[in-house]
Image (tube, rainbow, N blue to C red):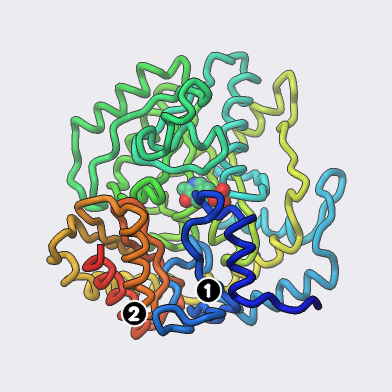
Amino acid sequence: MPEPLTPGELLALDRRHVWHPYGPMPGRQDPLIVESAAGVRLRLAEPAEGRSELIDGMSSWWSAVHGYNHPVLNEAARGQLDRMSHVMFGGLTHEPAVRLAARLVELTPEPLQHVFLADSGSVSVEVAVKMCLQYWRSLGRPDKRRLLTWRGGYHGDTFQPMAVCDPDGGMHHLWSGLLPRQVFADAPPPGFDAPPDPAYEAHLRDLVARHAHELAAVIVEPVVQGAGGMRFHSPALLRVLREACDEHDVLLVFDEIATGFGRTGELFAAGHAGVSPDVMCLGKALTGGYLTLAATLCTTRVADGISRGELPVLAHGPTFMGNPLAAAVALASIDLLLGHDWRQEVKRIETGLREGLTATAALPGVRDVRVLGAIGVVQLDHPLDEAGMAATTRAAVREGVWLRPFRDLLYTMPPYITGDDDLARICAALHAAARAG
Ligand SMILES: *Cc1c(COP(=O)(O)O)cnc(C)c1O
């Protein structure tokens, strides 16, 4: 082993050479150095604001639902590591990938029967789009190649996903002329419990009808729009989309990369509406936050369509497709989730967040507080600039909690194993951050 770097050396190298998400080069702000993590706690190499441990309010971006360093997931990874960490998936197969695919088919709505294991959420969206485009091409309708979505969405950072991210928040202007031009509906009316809005429903139906001749698919995040603005909408809108797509011969894609595996209180958010898509993307919590893995599921209709085409195969095959290590951990993570009363855990967190954030809603500068499942959002009445982001993050760290605000949003989606005391501290940190913002 080489000599460990001192925190100072590590930060200097980080700043000079390492890109961080949506970061400048060289870096302008020092990230916190995490030495290890266990349960819901991140252990820092150097104390920050007097804290050497932080409660993770982010689940590492929706993924670490069971917390860190979990003995069951560690064992699954070790067991698989001793057999093989990877083999190519072309011409070869293995038990972890096959069992995982079968498990996903069993858990998701009945019509979804076929699984493409991709290596990240964005790639799974690329594959979903490719499936839809190839389906229509195979059926002799290559003009059906545009996508429809609603504003306020987020589907990843590669080019197809970027084209269906919110056109204002998603930095589209940078890429005008380069991104495929998609069809955008207005953002869904806010609120999981929002009453039916006939005008908005008519707007959706009308757009699908008018563009059906050129639409391959409608793609949305069901119930929760995540990184596009942490907004919730009525599940009834998913039924409207399903009906409109059926009526006008358009495929429906649900991006459940953030919402999947219980986060919103249903195993998959589509379950709130009892609606099944033609194609579904999963990622983030799939491996319990251990390794990068995503999946695109589709119906037999879509798979058969593709197979009848001029190119009768799905033309995609990443090097690390079906990675055994990730698949083995994913299987263990799913067993762990379903082996607990996860519904009750998510409900408990929902109640804790609702109660814990009541006072925050009354703070000056706070526009809205909303909670759904194990997701708590504090929306400010102004966007945070770089200094505001630093100040709010620092305020949370002072409370012993890790949060990562963006734009006008302070939010948490804690690991499901977060205890009531730690949850109360997360709420206190959101409150402190809102005061600092
Ligand atoms: C995070 C996310 C993605 C992108 O996943 P990556 O693994 O970051 O590529 C796509 N869609 C949704 C809804 C997401 O939350």
For residue 173, above or below residue 328: above
Would residue 1 be seen by someone viewing this image from the given angle?
yes
292 lies left or right of 147: right
- Read off the residue under disc 1: 66
Q: Quadrant of residue 345?
A: bottom left
Tally the numbered discs: 2
- For the residue labelled by badge 2, is the local secondary structure a helix, a strand or a loop? loop
**Amino acid type, label 1:** His
Of 190 and 18, nearer the camera is 18
Report the residue at 42% width, 36% height from top.
Answer: 171
Between 79 and 275, the one lying in front of the other is: 79
Cα–Cα span, label 1 and label 2: 22 Å
Q: Where is residue 244, by image quadrant? A: top left
Kindly identify which residue carries mark 2.
Answer: 399
Per the rendering, the mark at residue 329 is none
N-term mark: 1 or 2: 1
Residue density around tag 1, few if under 14, some if 14–19, many if 20 or more, within 10 Å: many
Q: Residue at x 67, y 53 (%)?
A: 101
Mark 2 and ligand 1: say if the CB distance to the nearest ligand atom is below 8 Å: no
Q: Residue at x 65, y 44 (%)?
A: 114
Which tag is nearer the camera, tag 1 or tag 2? 2
127 sits to left or right of 386: right
Residue 365 in picture, x, y percent from top left: 16, 59
Report the quarter where the C terminus lies: bottom left
Image quarter of residue 348: bottom left
